Image (tube, rainbow, N blue to C red):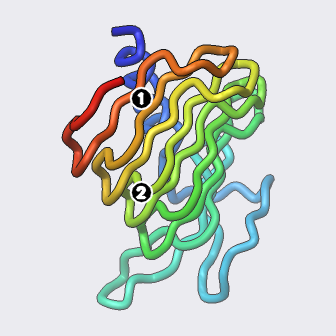
Amino acid sequence: MQSKKLMRMFTLGLALAAPVAFGGDATAQLTCPEGTKQAGSKADGLFCRKQELAGSSFVAHGPYRSFHANGKKAAVGQYSNGFKTGTWSFYDEAGNEYGKTEFRENNYHGKRFLYFASGKPQFIEEYQNGLKNGLVQELSEDGKVVHQARFENGKEVAVK
């Protein structure tokens, strides 16, 4: 039960750590890919944007950074044509990494970690195209497996 609560908090943290805004703030610089420009603000999240081929709207493309009110980084990741891609890292207000998630086209894809304050893994999940697929583990702070399950296409198939 506690693990479900922690996962809900982690998911909420992901949603809150990834705002997208189009104001400007030149206080932090990203290295944007050719053909893109930095957008957003340090308060709302910085990202690179490019114009869509089919119109006048813009899509996020390139690095992304968001910050806590105290100025410490909250999230670091990458966009590709408007989609979260690659490994995203999430940080608490003290600057400690509390989570790391791999994305492909906005879906969890690969490993997803949630860390104890000590930096040791608390949850390790495997995803494929947004569905749990593979091993899911909950660990104690000393690294022992507390709960383990295997998933295939989002369905639990084995519990240990």
Q: Is residue 90 left or right of residue 58?
A: right
Q: Is residue 18 left or right of residue 87?
A: left
23, above or below 8, in the image: below
The picture places residue 10, in percent across and down from the top left corner, at: 47, 28
Q: Residue at x 69, y 75 (%)?
A: 32
Mark 1 element type: helix
Mark 2 element type: strand
Query: What is the residue that sits farthest to the top in this orientation?
Result: 2
Specify the quadrant of the image occupied by residue 100.
Answer: top right
On residue 12, the disc is 1
Q: Earlier in the sequence, mark 1 or mark 2?
A: 1
152, above or below 40, in the image: above
Task: Kindly identify the amino acid type of the residue bearing the numbered disc 2.
Answer: His
Specify the quadrant of the image occupied by residue 11.
Answer: top left
Label 2 belongs to which residue? Answer: 109
Q: CA distance from mark 1 to mark 2?
A: 18 Å
Task: Kindly identify the amino acid type of the residue bearing the numbered disc 1.
Answer: Leu
Quadrant of the snapshot with the N terminus:
top left
25, above or below 120, in the image: below
Q: Residue at x 57, y 24 (%)?
A: 122
